[in-house]
Amino acid sequence: MDVDTKYMQLALKLAQRGIGSVEPNPAVGAVVVKSNQIIGKGWHKKFGDTHAEINALQACKTLGVNPHGATMYVTLEPCCHEGKTGPCTQVIIQAGLAKVVVATIDPSQHANGTCLKQLRDAGIEVQTGPCQTQARLLNAPFIKFASTGKCWVTLKWAQSIDGKLAWADRSNEQRWISGEQSRKDAHKLRRRAQAILVGINTVLADDPLLTPRPSKGKKPVRIIMDNDLRIPPDCKLIKTAKKTPVIIYTNQNSVQANHKIAQKLTKKSAELLTCPNTHDRSNLHFLLDELSRRGIAHLLVEGGPRVITSFLKEHLADEIVVYIAPKILAGSGCADITEPMAELKQNIDLYHVDIKLLGDDIRLSGLSKPEQPT
């Protein structure tokens, strides 16, 4: 392993600590090296806080080491615009760094190489590329949204070996198929997303809250696909709509036919988003366009078999995360995902596959498009 890869991999590990806290901003890590010694480390800890580069340089100061002439390894192009914090490029220049090694360019309109040019113009040597693929995968939702203006879609479900997503008897103490470690990991996914989507059948069967636990930081928007407006006005989602946004995705005919229910839902702070009659685009395309327009960079789909398969049919999934429990539910299970998936016209290969053991469960994840992240 060469030196650049070694230090950049450390920066990537630091960046991972911010996942679930920094979104919709990217997770970034930085390492400062002088005379082959690490003199500063930092990462972007949460949305609105100081950036990784500033934290790494502050760490140098804390150690009493002057970073002048040092090299900084950073996982994403340092910012050069005034946002919630000041531009990192100016702090880097003022610190007198000799070299900055960047894993990948920030494709945002205010960056996209402009910030690296600013560093070069100040006489700092700039190198790009080490661990580029890993860096882009780490922030895939941010990279896609910054590049295309379209939100990243993650499909997530837990299943038994025989493809069942739920117990037939929901009153059973064994409410969950997956184990505790898998459920904790799933809540990390929720914290990373800006919106969580389920179908109405999930709401009717489980009465979920769809909030990350433990409940800290930003709360994702909760979206329910409900064509016939069957959502109970007294369900947990509606009861908590004033605190955490709820969008009910339905159609205009249902709103007109159930105007009293619609009024009751809106009075309880739920938003009704109706889909227009589209001839050339599916309802899901309209929904994703609307979410993207609202600045939602990452949508987590937790629906049942039909909802999950609908995204696959339209080739709208960017990422798939599956928790496989060592159980064969047979007749004790329901919500068989293999049946609707048999209707898919094409097979789907996963790329950049990652397999982890969480307790007794297997977590399998991968991207559904080889060119991702764009």
Image: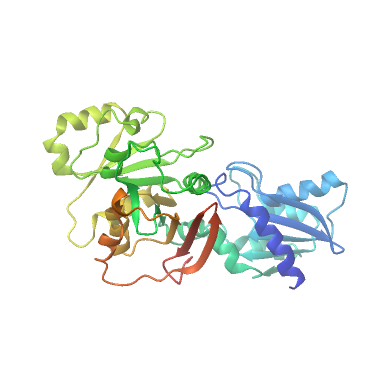
* Image quarter hosting the N terminus: bottom right
Q: Quadrant of residue 172?
A: top left
- State the image coordinates of residue 280 (x, y, percent, origin top left): 20, 63
- State the image coordinates of residue 269 (x, y, percent, origin top left): 32, 29
Is residue 94 among the parts visible in the rendering? yes
Q: Quadrant of residue 89?
A: bottom right
On the picture, is 366 further left or further right than 55?
left
Is residue 286 among the parts visible in the rendering? no
Q: How is the image coloured?
A: rainbow
Q: Is residue 24 above or below residue 120?
A: above
On the picture, is 253 further left or further right than 73?
left
Q: Residue furthest left?
A: 257
Q: Quadrant of residue 97?
A: bottom right
Residue at x 50%, y 48% (from the top left corner): 192
Question: Camera-side residue: 69 or 304?
Answer: 304
Question: Camera-side residue: 262 or 337?
Answer: 337
Residue at x 44%, y 45% (from the top left corner): 194
Residue at x 23%, y 58% (from the top left corner): 282
Q: Is residue 50 above or below residue 122?
A: above
- State the image coordinates of residue 65 (x, y, percent, origin top left): 87, 51
Question: Camera-side residue: 180 or 132?
Answer: 180
**Number of numbered discs:** 0
On the picture, is 243 further left or further right than 18?
left
